[in-house]
């Protein structure tokens, strides 16, 4: 769990009017689900929304072992006394912060069930251990995200959970904008950013079964290596080809595509 005090807005290049739609939904008290592939900008978008709403951001990374108590809180022995200590979700609800449940589909269904009363018109969290109902303070907003491509069928979210959210699908920026992001984040010149993005677009379009789409994050990483002085060829190899190659046949196909785009020789 991480908590970020509201700070300056992070750099976020909008693909369209998604920030406005999300801000309005949050202000109306609606929970927002973002779906999209890894490294396409979901977390950055959530951070920009928290900054726009001028609220602290509490991020919870969801996983199999996350329990309801991890979210709600638990009794702990503090200096000889047994005291209730709020979990991150309860803190966010009480303080009117923005709560972001990252990779929400990884959490177990019984863990997510504690959110039900918070995410309908009741807008309150029920702490079964203490018997307290905690109403959402003004400013509280809940956002969640997951990657529909990578979750297993066993991790399908229940309709009763999914239908408590308005949902936006986030994807890679159009090439010109993605190149601006790569340039901004890494400091490479325009021609390098453009070549990397062009390569990524070719890989994302590839029909080769084993090729997974490269993320904007990966492009930024490869570009950062170039900005730090590594030749483009080496940067592309360790920053792009290797992370995407889980098997030899894929590496060969990647090489071929990247040679055609002129970033490998
Ligand atoms: N629209 C954007 N504006 C600015 N930076 C962006 C944008 N999209 C992607 N990036 C860059 O890509 C990186 C990865 O984005 P981010 O961490 O938000 O991805 P994510 O969708 O949350 O991925 P994951 O699902 O793996 O958590 C960011 O650190 C940032 O450098
Ligand atoms: Mg993320």
Image: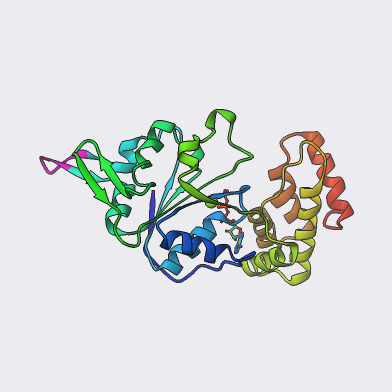
Q: Is residue 95 left or right of residue 214?
A: left
Residue extending furthest top? 154
Q: Position of residue 29 (x, y in %)?
A: 40, 57
Residue drawn 48% across the image and 48% down it = 165
Query: How many numbered markers are drawn?
Result: 0
Q: Is residue 113 left or right of residue 83?
A: right
Residue drawn 51% across the image and 43% down it = 103
**Is the stretch drawn in magenta largely helix, strand or loop?**
strand
- Can residue 137 be seen here? yes
Q: Position of residue 95 (x, y in %)?
A: 28, 58
Q: Which span is picked out in magenta?
A: 75-83
Q: Is residue 223 left or right of residue 5?
A: right
Q: Position of residue 143 (x, y in %)?
A: 46, 52
Q: Position of residue 121 (x, y in %)?
A: 36, 49
- The answer to whether 176 is drawn above or below residue 99 in the figure is below
Residue drawn 73% across the image and 71% down it = 189
Task: Let me know if residue 150 is in the magenta part.
Answer: no
Figure quadrant of the C terminus: bottom right
- The answer to whether 237 is drawn above or below residue 181 in the figure is above
- Can residue 106 be seen here? no
């Amino acid at each position: 769990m991480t908590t970020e005090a509201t700070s300056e807005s992070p750099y976020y290049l909008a693909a369209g009017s998604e920030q406005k739609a999300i801000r309005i939904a949050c202000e109306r008290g609606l929970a927002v689900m973002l779906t999209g592939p890894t490294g396409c900008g979901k977390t950055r978008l959530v951070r920009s929304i928290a900054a726009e709403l001028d609220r602290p951001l509490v991020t919870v990374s969801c996983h199999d072992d996350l329990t309801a108590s991890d979210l709600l809180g638990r009794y702990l022995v503090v200096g000889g006394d047994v005291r209730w200590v709020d979990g991150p979700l309860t803190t966010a609800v009480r303080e009117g912060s923005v709560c972001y449940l990252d990779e929400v589909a990884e959490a177990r269904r019984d863990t997510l069930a504690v959110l039900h009363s918070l995410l309908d018109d009741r807008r309150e969290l029920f702490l079964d251990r203490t018997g307290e109902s905690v109403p959402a303070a003004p400013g509280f907003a809940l956002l969640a995200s997951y990657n529909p491509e990578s979750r297993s069928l066993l991790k399908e979210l229940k309709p009763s959970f999914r239908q408590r959210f308005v949902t936006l699908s986030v994807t890679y920026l159009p090439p010109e904008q993605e190149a601006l992001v790569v340039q901004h984040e890494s400091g490479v010149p325009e021609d390098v950013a453009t070549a990397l993005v062009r390569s990524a677009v070719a890989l994302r379009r590839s029909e080769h079964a084993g090729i997974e789409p490269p993320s904007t994050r990966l492009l930024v990483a490869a570009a950062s290596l170039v900005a730090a002085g590594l030749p483009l060829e080496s940067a592309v190899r360790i920053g792009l080809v290797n992370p995407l190659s889980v098997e030899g046949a894929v590496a060969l196909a990647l090489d071929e595509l990247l040679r055609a785009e002129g970033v490998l020789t």
